[in-house]
Image (tube, rainbow, N blue to C red):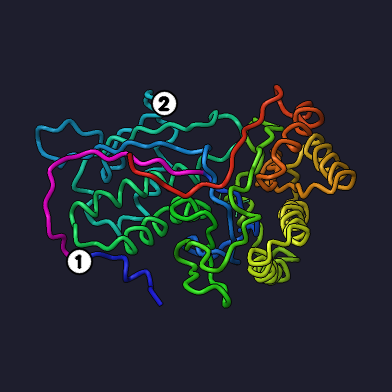
Amino acid sequence: MLTTNDFIPQAYSHNIESGEFQWSAPSNIALVKYWGKKDNQIPANPSVSFTLNNCKTITTLAFAKKDSSTPLTITNGKFSFDLFFEGKPKEDFKPKIQKFLERIEIYLPFLKEYHFTIDTQNTFPHSSGIASSASGMAALAMNLMSIEKALNPEMTDAYFYQKASLLARLGSGSACRSVKGQVVVWGNQANIEGSSDLYGVEFPNAIHDNFKNFQDTILLVDKGEKQVSSTVGHDLMHNHPYAERRFAQAHENLDKLIAIFESGNLEEFIKVVESEALTLHAMMMTSMPYFILMKPNTLQIINAIWKFRNDTNIPVCFTLDAGANVHVLYPENVSKKVLQFIKDELVGFCQNGQYICDHIGNGALSN
Ligand code: PMV
């Protein structure tokens, strides 16, 4: 089994003065949820997600060796970088990037040798309530790995993607599931070969055709800033009265999904996925301090989905992130009917009638 030491490089074989890379990385939607962590972004329980396709971050990373003729923007005397969001300087994102670079410095010893220009944009509206940390951190990690690969061209693809996921994880836990593969597992699970707490891996077992091109329509219920960040939420799982049982349940649900992915049993899929979503929010409601991220319209949508499913037998279900938005999940062959249902009955619960149509994708891409 690999350890963190395996990702600390020896001397590089090449020397590079400057260059530029561009990667896009998608968001992902967890089916079994990560909520609670140990030190160094090690998850308290394993999780599995569908990689999305349309909701992504596109990041260009330019780098140039620091020398006396380079005008430097020194941040904290350590890392030198400029940050642009949608073409404009974005000072308020900088502390998060600074912290990320500090965390990953041990794995990328070249970081202090260069000045970086990070230029980033999302395909989804910034204030949509869709977390951009997963796609954003994954896109940045991919670019940094492209630099490392240029310094060490002998690097294997396996190492490249594993380390990209490990770095992304240190930026935002769920980001490690946005690197490669359609269905990604993060966290040690006895029955999933290769699974690791350190990085995400492509789900290695069989996946039934029912899940091919699975659809995720994201209903934007509340686009405001979250009242409680996921960092705070994760922390509240320490000394949480139900934590241990919850972590054990995540393992059980992941085992159930292994069988469900193979058989294509959508009824069982729905049970696991909806229970996971509600359990995540139950953990928030039962922590101390307690909090609620769902909004009245979140519940309206859930009830409407349940009624529609009962009335029609169409296998559509919901999941939730750490927020009020609802992800509506369904197989491709019922798309037409579900989209009509969304337009007829759910759009009214969305802020400004907004929703985003997405589906399973393959992971990060270099341009
Ligand atoms: O990656 P973070 O720290 O933003 O945590 C994300 C947690 C959930 O989105 C609620 C669940 C998950 O597994 O993605």
In the rendered image, residue 51 lying in the magenta stretch gets the answer no
In the picture, measured across the screen, residue 150 lies left or right of residue 321, that is: left
Mark carried by residue 23? none
- Is the residue 227 above or below the residue 145 in the image? above
Image position of 118 (left or right of 287): left
Q: Estimate how packed mark 2 is, as few (under 14), some (14 to 19) or many (20 or more) residues with alpha carbons within 10 Å.
A: some
Crowd rating for badge 1 (residues with CA inside 10 Å; few <14, some 14–19, many 20+): few
Mark 1 lies on a secondary structure that is: loop
Q: Which mark is residue 86?
A: 2
Residue 12: in magenta span: yes
Q: Quadrant of residue 10?
A: bottom left
Residue at 28% from the left image edge and 65% from the top image edge: 8
Q: Earlier in the sequence, mark 2 or mark 1?
A: 1
**3D distance between C-alphas at marks 2 and 1:** 36 Å
Circle 1 residue: 10
Q: Name the image quarter holding the N terminus.
A: bottom left
Q: Residue 257 appears at what percent x and percent y?
A: 66, 65
Q: Which residues are magenta?
A: 10-26
Q: Please, is residue 202 above or below residue 335 in the view?
A: below
Residue placed most toward the observer, 52 or 42: 52
At 39% across and 33% down in the image, what residue appears? 120
Placement of 341 over or under 250, stated as above or below: above
Residue at x 37%, y 69% (from the top left corner) = 4
Instruction: Give how far across and how far down residue 322 sits, in percent.
Output: 66, 46
Asked if residue 272 lies left or right of residue 208, the reply is right
Q: Is mark 2 within 8 Å of ligand 1?
A: no
Residue drawn 54% across and 57% down? 183
Residue 272 x/y as whole percent: 74, 60
